[in-house]
């Protein structure tokens, strides 16, 4: 008999059967971005959980910024298939912060920007334009954006076929 941790589990995603590898819950984010402080009291870093899930012909990424250590509330201010914008109120300890943090993935498909100013944190997730003229075209799109447990939460998809 094989153990579930070796085989993973089977799930249905976007109408296709996929094998899902078990992921252990991470208490700390797997990505850390340094905050470039201009003035005030700012956090040293902003953490993100970026969790990939391979599906047939695509990869879906779940992105959750860990903003709870320095914010009181968060809201989705808008999104489309290439960008999502969030706004959060900084808690009293960091309300004076003026600074920014930016990360671009090694694959250059996404960019995450955090801007601290005016007692607020502005978070933007942005995907690159589709690369349709290369030998291996790549299409990206945000498929879900919301706020979950007071944190921004989004899912974006990278595929070889046009959605």
Image (spheres, rainbow, N blue to C red):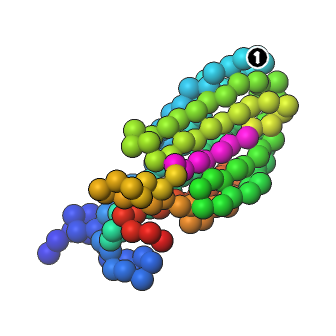
Q: Residue furthest left?
A: 1
At a point 68% along the width and 58% down the height, the residue shown is 79
| Quadrant assignment, res 52 | bottom left
- Helix, strand or loop under label 1: strand
Q: Residue furthest bottom?
A: 15
Q: Residue furthest front?
A: 133
Residue 42 vs residue 56: left or right?
right
At a point 39% along the width and 43% down the height, the residue shown is 107
* Residue 22, position as x, y percentages in the image: 34, 62
* Residue 5, position as x, y percentages in the image: 26, 63
Kindly identify which residue carries mark 1: 39
Secondary structure, magenta segment, majority class: strand
* 112 versus 4 height, above or below: above
Residue 92 visible here:
no
Residue 145 visible here:
yes
Q: Where, quadrant-wise, is the N terminus in this rendering?
A: bottom left
Compare residues 85 and 72 and report the one nearer the observer. Answer: 85
* Residue 105, position as x, y percentages in the image: 45, 40
Disc 1 crowd, CA 10 A, few/some/many (<14, 14-19, 20+): few
* Residue 72, position as x, y percentages in the image: 78, 43
Residue 152 vs residue 140: left or right?
right
Compare residues 62 and 140 and report the one nearer the observer. Answer: 140
Q: Which residues are magenta?
A: 122-128
| Quadrant assignment, res 55 | bottom left
At a point 37% along the width and 58% down the height, the residue shown is 137
At a point 81% along the width and 41% down the height, the residue shown is 89
Is residue 104 part of the magenta span, yes or no? Answer: no
Compare residues 5 and 159 and report the one nearer the observer. Answer: 159
Compare residues 29 and 56 and report the one nearer the observer. Answer: 56
Number of numbered discs on residues: 1
* 14 versus 22 height, above or below: below
């Amino acid at each position: 008999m094989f153990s579930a941790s070796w085989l993973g589990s089977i799930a249905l995603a976007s109408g296709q059967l996929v094998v899902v590898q078990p992921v252990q819950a991470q208490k700390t984010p797997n990505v850390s971005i340094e905050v470039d402080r201009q003035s005030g009291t700012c956090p040293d870093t902003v953490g993100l959980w970026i969790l990939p899930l391979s599906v047939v012909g695509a990869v879906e990424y779940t992105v959750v910024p860990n903003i709870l250590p320095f914010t009181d509330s968060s809201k989705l201010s808008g999104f489309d298939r290439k960008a999502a914008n969030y706004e959060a109120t900084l808690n009293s300890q960091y309300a004076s912060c003026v600074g920014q943090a930016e990360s671009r993935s090694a694959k250059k498909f996404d960019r995450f920007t955090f801007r601290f100013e005016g007692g607020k944190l502005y978070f933007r997730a942005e995907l690159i334009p589709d690369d349709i003229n290369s030998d291996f075209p790549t299409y990206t799109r945000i498929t879900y954006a919301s706020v979950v447990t007071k944190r921004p939460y989004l899912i974006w998809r990278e595929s070889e076929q046009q959605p």
